[in-house]
Image (tube, rainbow, N blue to C red):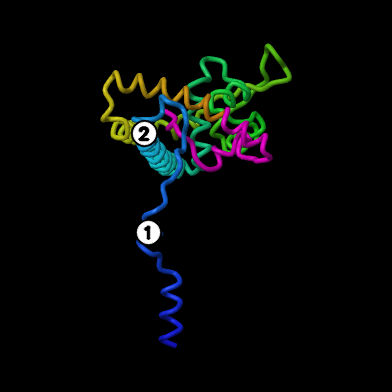
Amino acid sequence: MRESRRRANGAAAATPSEAGGYILPPTVSRDVLLENGSDRRFRSLVADLFTISARMEIVRDHLGRKLGITGPQYSLIVAIARLQGAGGVSVGAVALALHVSSAFVATETGKLVRRRFLAKRTNPLDRRSMLLSIAPAGRLKLDSISRDIRAINDLFFGELDARSFAALSSAAATLVSGSSHALQRLNGAGGRAGMKGDWMRGQDLLLQE
């Protein structure tokens, strides 16, 4: 038994040359993303973005739970509150702002209408579409956690100054566009990663405010 165990351990153990001999090929080729020919800084950025994304999802889920809804539904109602103006906002406009499909917005907002978080009415300029707005009960619920939202966001983004905040906002918008192109490539290869609405079920890169 001991001999077989030693043989198994020996087969699994890598020699020093095997353990240290592999060098990961560059994960990016654009000169502007390389530093002295190395992608080390780029890889650090990607790792940081994953960390930020995961933490934002935790925050979003926390705020959704305080309202008794899901994290993605929280993002929807906050976006609607921001976009509705005096007359409401269309499903398509919400979908465009959140980079998801109109079908996803229609499905999830339908649930929120039934729960009286949202109100909807026929668009007087186009009777084929509906306009969404925050219902009175929804306003009360959002107001009840507004202090918590501000406190979390002030901490989350508190180390940014005006210049770095403006740079981050611009860079994030650019990455939204670039990531769309990457997902189109995946779709062309037969993948499903580019289906709009998937990030709303899982994660997003920006904490909606």
Disc 2 or 1, which lies upstream in sequence? 1
Q: Magenta part of the protein: which range?
A: 181-209
The residue shown at (35%, 61%) is: 16
Kind of residue at badge 1: Ser
For the N terminus, the image quarter is: bottom left
The residue shown at (27%, 30%) is: 158
Decide if residue 69 is in sight here.
Answer: yes
The answer to whether residue 126 is above or below residue 158 is above
Q: Secondary structure at mark 2?
A: helix
The residue shown at (30%, 34%) is: 151
Q: Which mark is residue 194?
A: none
Query: Where residue 20 sits in the image (x, y, percent)?
Result: 36, 55
Q: Secondary structure at mark 1?
A: helix
Q: Which residue is mark 2?
A: 149
Quarter holding residue 149: top left
- Cβ–Cβ below 8 Å for labels 2 and 1? no
Q: Which mark is residue 17?
A: 1
Kind of residue at badge 2: Ile
The residue shown at (43%, 81%) is: 5
Select label 2 or label 1 by which is in front: 1
Query: Where residue 39 sits in the image (x, y, percent)?
Result: 39, 35
For the C terminus, the image quarter is: top left
Residue closest to the far top: 125
Quarter holding residue 35: top left
Q: Nearer the viewer, residue 152 or 180?
A: 180
